[in-house]
Image (cartoon, rainbow, N blue to C red):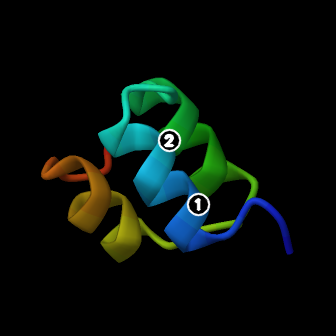
Amino acid sequence: MFPDYESIKSWYELKLWTKDMVKMAVVCKVITVDQFKTITGDDYAA
């Protein structure tokens, strides 16, 4: 599935994706809640 975890992580680090965009990846079941925390450093809040 694309985008995958590694792509999302890279895009977030490059500031191409916002935290809200990463959150939508969790909603769409592209990444997990744990992966959200790894990428953003914040706990996921629905």
The circle drawn on residue 7 is 1
Q: Quadrant of residue 26?
A: bottom right
Determine which residue is flagged by label 2.
Answer: 23
Q: Secondary structure at mark 2?
A: helix
Type of the residue with mark 1:
Ser
Is residue 30 visible in the rendered image? The answer is: yes
User: Looking at the image, is 15 positioned above or below residue 29?
Assistant: above
Q: Residue drawn at (19%, 52%), measured in percent from left and top? A: 43
Residue 28: where, in percent of width, then height? 75, 54
Q: Residue drawn at (15%, 47%), measured in percent from left and top? A: 42
Is residue 46 visible in the rendered image? The answer is: no
Q: Is residue 27 left or right of residue 20?
A: right
Rate crowding at label 2 as few (under 14), some (14 to 19) or many (20 or more) other CA atoms within 10 Å.
many
Type of the residue with mark 2:
Lys
Q: Is residue 11 left or right of residue 25?
A: left
Residue 27: where, in percent of width, then height? 65, 50
Task: Name the outermost residue toward the front.
Answer: 14
